[in-house]
Amino acid sequence: MPHRPVQDSEIQIHLADSTQKPNFSQRISNFVRDKGNISLIITFAVTTIALTLFLLVQDVSGKQVVSYFLSGGLFGFAGGFTNWLAVVMLFTRIPGVYGSGVIPNRYREIRAKVKEVIMEMFFDEEFLEKYLSHKLMEVANNVDMKAKVGEIVHSKTVDRLIDEKLASLGTTPEGQLILKMGVDPKSLKPMIKPFLQGFGEDLAPMIKETLSDPMQVIDVSKLRKEMEKYMNSRMETLTEQRVTSLLEAVIRPHLGWIIVWGCVFGGLIGIITQAVGLAPSY
């Protein structure tokens, strides 16, 4: 039977609920939504009703019929309860029960494995080189470098930088020499801009060629090391409680089926043992 995937919103709600104590109505709602709890209630009800009927019915043939329901309900409840306890022990430490709290006890290994998988899948050096090469090539092909250089040269930022440099030129020996020649440094601005634009246009093909090779622009190995440092720092924020809550939000809804099938198979075993005469005498 296919399982419905857990949505991100459900995980976020579960994580939010883990930091806040749920009220009574929320507890009831969560309890009812768990299919494992419903199966336990059903098998317990069958066991209770069958036991009551077994005590009330005096007819031998009637007791034999009821005993099938009693064995099915009792074995089903035992199987479901055992699986329910196993699910609880997966996320919760139970004092005196060795092996309980698997996820809380191994949360460091879990988060380390998560980091390892992310680094290997998404930050492999070969993958990064191909990805960056593709993206930089897109930029190089989609952007008119010469037009971009013209926009930069005629921008207000470049105007301000030229004015600042020309103003400071008057305090230098070269600037003093220009002043003695009767040339105002500010008058050089109309000549500087065309020079910068022409120089930039000459560099445009070189820039485009450089962008086609990410190794000339970015040190992929260094980038990967920086990402690994960042991942290490982020993983430290994943505490035992957060790791447990996250995994519980992802897999707990599906673990209810383990309890359901525990009840089903336990009930079938109970009926079979009753039929072949291996069930206990009631």
Image (tube, helix red, strand yellow):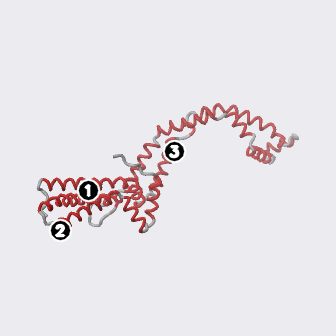
Q: Residue at x 48, y 46 (%)?
A: 225
Upstream in sequence: badge 1 or badge 3: 3
Percent position of residue 107, x then y:
37, 57
Q: Residue at x 51, y 44 (%)?
A: 223
Position of residue 271 measured from the top left corner of the image (x, y, whole percent): 18, 55
- Measure how far apart labels 1 and 3 are at the Cα level: 53 Å
Q: Identity of the amino acid at label 2?
A: Leu
Q: Nearer the viewer, residue 36 or 104?
A: 36
Q: How many residues crowd around disc 1 within 10 Å: few (fewer than 14), some, or many (20 or more)?
A: many
Q: Nearer the viewer, residue 271 or 110?
A: 271
Badge nearest the viewer, 1 or 3: 1
Q: Earlier in the sequence, mark 2 or mark 3?
A: 2
Q: Amino acid at mark 3?
A: Leu
Which numbered disc, 2 or 1, marks the residue closer to the eye? 2
Q: Are marks 2 and 1 in contact (CB under 8 Å)?
A: no
Mark 2 vs 1, N-terminal side: 2
Q: Looking at the image, do the residues carrying marks 1 and 3 touch, with CB atoms under 8 Å apart?
A: no
Q: Which residue is mark 2?
A: 56
- Residue, disc 3: 223
Q: Which residue is mark 1?
A: 263
Residue 101, given in percent of the width and then of the height, sits at: 32, 60
Q: Along the line of sight, which residue is nearer the eye, 23 or 238?
A: 23
